[in-house]
Each structure stands twice: as C-alpha cells, then as structure tokens.
Image (cartoon, rainbow, N blue to C red):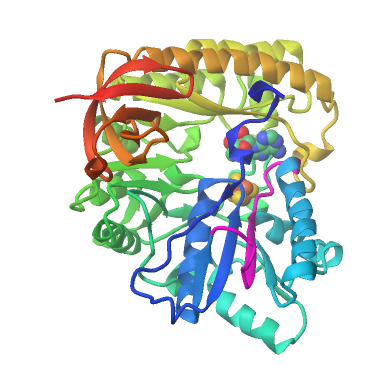
Amino acid sequence: MSPRDKSASRDVEQAAIIAAKPDVTPAQNTKKVFIKTYGCQMNVYDSERMADVLSPIGYAPVDAPDDADLVILNTCHIREKAAEKVYSELGRIRQHKEKNKPNMKVAVAGCVAQAEGAEIQRRAPVVDMVLGPQTYHKLPEMIAKVHRNTGDVLETEFDTIEKFDQLPKTRNVKGFSAFLTVQEGCDKFCTFCVVPYTRGAEVSRPVQQIVDEARDLARQGVREITLIGQNVNAYMAEGPDGSDWGLGQLIRHVALIGGIDRIRFTTSHPRDMDDDLIRVIGTEPKLMPYLHLPIQAGSNKILRAMNRDHTYAEYKALIAKIRAARPEIALSGDFIVGFPGETELDFEETMKCVEEIGYASSFSFKYSVRPGTPGASMLRQVDEDVKQDRLVRLQELLYAQQEAHNKSLIGKTLSVLVEGTGRKGGQLFGRSPYLTGTHFDGPEELVGQIVDVKIEEAGRNSLVGVLAV
Ligand code: 5AD
Ligand code: SF4
C-alpha cells in the first residue's frame, strides 16, 4: 500500500521508550514496565508521566514487552482503526503472558480505556487494570489492588486538577525536546470527535505549575518545549499576579526560562486564536514559526455540520492576520474527507481552501464514525470508496505543497536542534524551525545543541544540508 492510501501519521503507533531515572539504581528498580503509546502527543506525554509515577515503586521502563512485569497500552480512540488496534495487541499480549510470563500484569490506559472500559474487561480478560487519562496518578494504588487480588480495577473519573497535583514534581526526560501539557479536554463538541467524551471538559493548569515543570525540564537539558493541549489556545488559568492568563501570556513567561530556546504549541482551534496570541507569534523570537491550525473542511455547510463555529472566510482572514504578524510562518492543518453530507462540490471547496491557504505540512483522514458522537447518527454518510478517492486527491495536493515548501528552503540557513546521530556514520539528525527532519554531517558533540545548517537538498519529508560556519 502506498503511503497515500493510508490515513496519515497520528495513527502511527510509537512504542514509548522511556529512559530510566538517572538517580535510581538498578538494584532499587527491580521490576520492568513496558508502555506502548498510540495516538497523539498528549498520550506521549502521559506515557512519560506514567513512567514517572511508577519509578518510585520500583518499575524501570523497558522497550519491549518480552520480560516486562507490567505492560501498559496507552490507547487512542480518535478513529475506529486506532481503537481496534488495542484488541489485536491484547491478543498478542495474552499469548505472550500464557506462554512466557504468567505473572505479568496488563493495564489499558488512555482514551479507549475511558470510552470502553467495561467492554475491554469483558472482551479481554487478560486485562488487570483499566484507567482513563485522568487517573494514572493512581497507578501505584491500582497495582497494589491487583496484587491483593481484590477484583477488577477500573478507574475512569475526571479530575484533571487532582491528577496534576498528585504527579511527581520532577520528570525523567531523555532528549532535548519535550512535550508539556498545559491544557486538557475540550468544550467544543465538534460533531465528529470523541475527545470531549474521552478527555472531559477543558481544564488549564495554573501558570506556576507549568513554569515549575518547564524549569525542571530545562535543568535536565531540554532546549525545546511544546506546550500541548487538545485546545491549547483556549488556555486560561491563574497567573502569578492572580489574574487570568491566556496562552500568549503563558508563552511570554515560559520564554523567560534560561535554557529553553525554542517554544511550540499545539493543537489550536481557530475560534480561540486571540489577538494577544497573534501578537506573541509576531514578537517572541523563541516561538518557532510553525503553526498547526486545523480547519478540517473548506465548505461552510460542512463546517456548520461539524459544529466548528466559523466559516472558511473567517479562517482565511485569521490566517492573513497571522501571516501579517509573522510572514515566514509555516502552516499545518488537519483535514477530514467524507463527513456526512459532503458532496463533490463540498469536497472541491476543501481543495480550494488548501490551494488558497497553502500548507507546509498536514494530517488528513477519512471520516470515521465514532459511537456516541452526533456525526454517527447523521444522514447521508459517505461511501468508503468515495472517501478513499477524495483522500487520495487531497493528499496529492497537500504532499505537493509540503514538498514545495521544503524545496523553498534550499539555499537558506536554518537553525536546527540536533536530536541525535543519523543512520550513516558522521551524520547528525535534527529539526528545523518548521519541524522538518534535517540531516547533515557533523561531530557527535553537537547533539543537544542548536546549530545553523545550510539546506542543500529537500524531499517531501526531510532536508539535507551542511553545517554553516
Ligand atoms: N474521523 C476522522 N478524523 C477525525 N479526527 C478527529 N475525529 C475524527 C473522526 N471521527 C481528526 C481531526 C482532528 C485530528 C486530531 O483527528 O482532523 O483534528
Ligand atoms: Fe487519541 Fe484524541 Fe485521545 Fe489523543 S486525545 S489519545 S488523539 S482520542
């Protein structure tokens, strides 16, 4: 299957390989936990925090399930395919447990756990613990219960504030770029989306808590922080002066932290893009010139049916304002094709939107019916082959734009945060301000530094350059 045939990237599973705490000796960490992460950046963050919660009770992270004492699947419910993966993985885990590791414990965390907790327990008796995204601070308690054999363990309450209050104050990070959750949940209720049900209402963390966490990351060598939230630009919480701060103010404050040289934020909703945030985009040099601002569809009729609460013209005007504030900004978006009622003419408006706006990167999906959402019971669901055809056409355009954006960087010198060594000897790998993977030759000592790279070649997904001296 060509990559164009697939709903892109966010579905790609990633095993969260989490570094062991440097201050915990192997003798103290006698048990092993394997955490597998599906879905979005917030799940990546949550997996890291689960490892932080488990470290004090003696669990060291491992990067394969083979000899793990505890396996945690941190799941995604956003599309049907993502949710179904969990059950096939549980089948493989059951076989492994029966054959090799009878005492292994299994937990299902994340959004599938929240949405289908009881069904998981019914369909997969191998599962010992089910925990929603707001309860993972309780893992030690839950594990103790499982070992006491006091029945099924299911935790799916919503108390985001309590979770963040209870999490360990220091994180174990590896690498130089880290996610930091500042906001969770969603009050927007787009008619296609499960997030308001799986992650709950919008909750923002207090500024001080975020700044403390960012300082801790900086102390551990992190140079780039991505502030994350399901609706990150709806961020609104108490600042140190007692007044309510939006995301713009928060970014200004995080930018003051020494050692943090790059800031990003994701995912934003067009409705919450306020003037202060646009001012910060235009003036804060630490904020990278890359903005993920999904529109989902170009037709006003479909935007209305999706309950997006804005028109295409409003989105276009917003983009013009952002580009006026920061002309070099690269845009990224999410798109759904085949939402109920989408005609060929509606779809062509999505194509026109992409042509007019121009995206440097994107994520595009076929509409997936999600139980319990308003979209699921809408009339005029679109046939699978029509969705597939539209996705292929849309991705052809989006990928051409991505490649053109990358090619426009040839000859330019970009700052690159060096994340590690490349596959070839002497090669380094890092990310451009636009998040593009960039390869160039250089000494290993540069890992963790931000260096200037002159771009010489560009493909659809990556750049190649030379160190600029
Ligand atoms: N079907 C397809 N794509 C979806 N998304 C969210 N819900 C669905 C769904 N039911 C996409 C949206 C969102 C991204 C995270 O996932 O484009 O912005
Ligand atoms: Fe998946 Fe959305 Fe949950 Fe993230 S918040 S794990 S994308 S369902």
Locate the N terminus and report the quarter of the image it occupies: top right
Report how many numbered discs are placed on residues in the image: 0
The residue under the point 42% across, 49% down is 235
- Nearest the eye: 236 or 254: 254
Rendered location of residue 126, percent (x, y): 79, 68
Rendered location of residue 125, percent (x, y): 82, 69
The residue under the point 63% across, 61% down is 65
Rendered location of residue 447, percent (x, y): 28, 43
Q: Would residue 358 be seen by someone viewing this image from the given angle?
A: no
Q: Is residue 349 left or right of residue 20?
A: right
Q: Is residue 382 magenta?
A: no
Q: Is residue 69 magenta?
A: yes
Rendered location of residue 210, percent (x, y): 34, 59
In this view, 370 is above or below 406: below
In this view, 288 is above or below 420: above
Q: Is residue 81 left or right of residue 136?
A: right
In this view, 153 is above or below 108: below
**Residue that lies at the very extreme toward the front in this rendered image:** 425
The residue under the point 80% across, 69% down is 98
**Dominant secondary structure of the residues highlighted in magenta in the image:** loop
Splitting the image into 4 quarters, where does residue 263 fall? Answer: top left
Locate the C terminus and report the quarter of the image it occupies: top left
Residue extent of the magenta highlight: 63-80
Splitting the image into 4 quarters, where does residue 7 fall? Answer: top right
Q: Would residue 438 be seen by someone viewing this image from the given angle?
A: yes
- Nearest the eye: 26 or 40: 26
